[in-house]
Image (cartoon, helix red, strand yellow):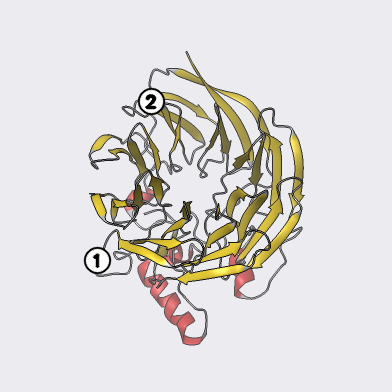
Amino acid sequence: MNSELVVKGLIFKGVRLLAGILLGLLFGGCSWFAWLPGVGDGGSKDDEDTSEPIKLEKFTAEADIRVVWKRGVGQGLGKKYVRLTPSVVEDRIVAADAYGGVFAFDRFNGKEIWANQFDPKNKKSFGVRALLARKDPSFVSGGVSTGDGLIFLGTTKGEIVALNITDGTESWRTQVGTEIGASPAVGDDEVFVHTIDDRLSALDVIDGRVIWTADNQMPLLTLRGTASPTYAQGVVFSGTAGGKIAALRGENGEPIWEQRLVLPEGRSELDRMVDVDASPLVSGSTVYGLAYQGNLVAFNRRDGRPLWQVQLSGFQDMAEGYGQIYVVNESDKIFAIDKETGEISWESESFLRRDLTAPVAYSNYLVVGDGEGYLHFLAQRDGRMIARRKIDGDGIRTKVTVAGDTVFVLANSGNLHALSLRLK
C-alpha cells in the first residue's frame, strides 16, 4: 500500500481527537496522518512498500525521446502527494505549482504567455494545523481543469478558484467545504468538484454559485485524494470512498444509478478500504470503474448493469486504446485488458514498486512516469518497451498530457518538459 493512506472522516474535537490518535497509532503509526499537510508522505506499512524499486531492465530502444522545450513552473509540487496535470487549450498549455502559481505557455515553443499567483501568500496559521504543516505551505490540491474560457483549481482550504485563461486574472472563487483532492470536471456550463469528505458539488461556471450537492457516507479510513468526476452527455459519473460508482444528472444531481465495485471485507478498517480513487472511464456505451483492494468493473452506461469484472486493485486513473483498458495496480504492475470481454491481453512487472503515474495512451504507445524521474514508452499492442529517458531527478507523480505529437511532463520539481518521440 502506498503512503497515500488517509483518514478523512475524523473530526478533531474533544474525545474524538484522542480516539482518532489512538486508532491511528494502532493501525498505521505516523502513516495514518498522511492526509494532513506535510505528514507521512514517505511512510509505509508493510515490507513490500519499504523494499527497493525494481531495477530497470536493459532493452533495445525502438525510438528516441527528444526534448522540444523545458520551462519552470513556480515552486513545484512540494512534499505532499499532489498531482496537478497540465491542461492544453488551443495554442497554449496551462500548468500550476502547489503554492498558487499558475503559468500559461505557448505549447509549441514554450514561450511564457502569462504568469499569476492567485494567492500571493498562504496565510500562516497557529495551533495543530500550523504544527502539522511543517515546512511545506503548499495549498493547491486539485487541478488543472479548463473549460468555457476558465481555469479551475482546488485548494486544501476547500476553495474552487476560477481564473481567466486569457490573462490568468481571477474570475471567481467559491468555498465548497473540505479539501479538494482531485481535478474538477467541466461540462454544460457547470463545474463538478469532489471533496475529500466524499461530497460532489456542481457549480455554475459563470459565477461559481453552488447549484447542487450530493453526499456519500464516509468510511473511517480512506486513501489520500478522491476520484475526479467524469462528465459525458449530461451525466456526471463519480467514484466514492465506499467502493461505488454513481451516475447523476448534471443539471440537478438526480441519481440515475449506483453500483458497488466491491464489498468491504476484513477484520480491520485497513482491510475494508475500497476507495474508488480512479476517475470513472467512459467509452462508448460502457463505464469502467476501478477500486482499491477491489475490482475493475465494466458497467452499462445507461442503467449501470455490470458487464464483466476482473479482480484488480488500483487507485490511478485508467487509459484506453487499441480496444484495451490500461491499469496500473497498487504494486505498479501494468495490465492491458480487453474492453469487451475483460480478458487480460498482456501484463508487465517491469516497474514494480517504482511509483508509476497513471498511464496515458499516445499514438500507438502507452506512457508512464515513475518516482525516480524516468519516462517510459510501451507498445500498446504487447507491452514491450519502446523508449525510456530520465526526465527529472525529483521524480514524476503527475500523469503526462498529450497534445498532437507532443507529450508534456510536469515533474515534481516544477520543471515542465515538452517531448517528442521519433522512431529510429
Residue 214 vertical placement versus 18 (above, below): above
Residue 121 visible: yes
Residue at x 60%, y 69% (from the top left corner): 210
Closest to the observer: 160 or 373? 160
Residue type for callout 2:
Met
Res 392 seen here: no
- Up the image or down, 274 lies above or below 403; here it is below
In the image: residue 127, left or right of residue 255: right
Is residue 6 left or right of 152 when viewed as pictured? left
The crowding category of the residue bearing disc 1, from other C-alpha atoms within 10 Å (few below 14, some 14 to 19, many at least 20), is some
| Residue 124 located left or right of residue 326 | right
Q: CA distance from mark 2 to mark 1?
A: 37 Å
Residue 83 drawn at (x, y percent)? 54, 49
Is the residue 229 above or below the residue 22 in the image?
above
Point out the image quarter for the N terminus.
Answer: bottom left
Tell me, for residue 265, which label it has, or none: 1
Q: What residue is disc 2 on?
A: 385
User: Percent position (x, y) of residue 255?
Assistant: 40, 67
Based on the displayed image, in which of its 4 quarters is residue 227 positioned?
Answer: bottom left
Viewer-side residue, 233 vs 158: 233
Q: Three-letter amino acid code at disc 1?
A: Glu
